[in-house]
Amino acid sequence: MVAVVLIVTAIEQLMNVYYRNVLELRGLPQEDITKIIRRCNVDVKIDWLITLVLGHELPKDLKKSITDLVELRNSIVHYKAIPGPLEGDEDSATRILARIENLGFDPLEIPLKLERTLENILEETNPDYKMSKI
């Protein structure tokens, strides 16, 4: 469970750095960029904000993986315990662990996949950025 919380934190940090860089390149003042980053949740950042800012979408499988991880993180962080019988598998923690085990993807790969995708989009939409990396 701790790993899920940390992975989602890494995803949020990547998105925040990405949006700060992109919006700086667009000439927005720092205070406006900070407001945008603080007021938009992860769902917004991986969906309509990226389309609005760059005219691109994240791949559907990546968006779904991030959404699944964010929902799991929220289940952990905003834990609302459902008690279960002493001899059963009905309690909240057991359900969360089962969801983690049944994700269908490696959560550790998602931040790296997101970073590569964001870099590709930024290079494609900003030739100067791409040139600066050569």
Image (tube, grey):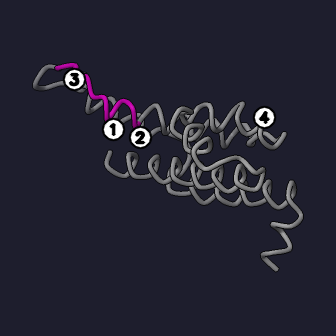
| Residue with the mark numbered 3 | 81
- Alpha-carbon distance for marks 4 and 3? 38 Å
In front: label 4 or label 3? 4
Q: Residue at x 73, y 55 (%)?
A: 117
- Alpha-carbon distance for marks 1 and 4? 36 Å
Which residue type does callout 1 highlight? Leu
The mark found on residue 52 in the picture is: 4
Q: Which residues are magenta?
A: 73-83
* Residue 46 on the magenta segment: no
The mark found on residue 97 in the picture is: 1
Q: Are marks 1 and 2 in contact (CB under 8 Å)?
A: yes
Q: Is residue 71 above or below residue 107?
A: above
Q: Residues within 10 Å of mark 3 (few under 14, many from 20)?
A: few
Q: Quadrant of residue 134?
A: bottom right
Q: Is residue 97 above or below residue 20?
A: above
Q: Secondary structure at mark 1?
A: helix
Task: Point out the tag, 4 or 3, that comes first from the N-terminus.
Answer: 4
- Alpha-carbon distance for marks 3 and 1? 13 Å
Q: Are marks 3 and 2 in contact (CB under 8 Å)?
A: no
Q: Residues within 10 Å of mark 4 (few under 14, many from 20)?
A: few
- Alpha-carbon distance for marks 1 and 2? 5 Å
Which residue type does callout 4 highlight? Leu
- Alpha-carbon distance for marks 2 and 4? 32 Å
Q: Secondary structure at mark 3?
A: loop
Task: Point out the tag, 3 or 2, that comes first from the N-terminus.
Answer: 3
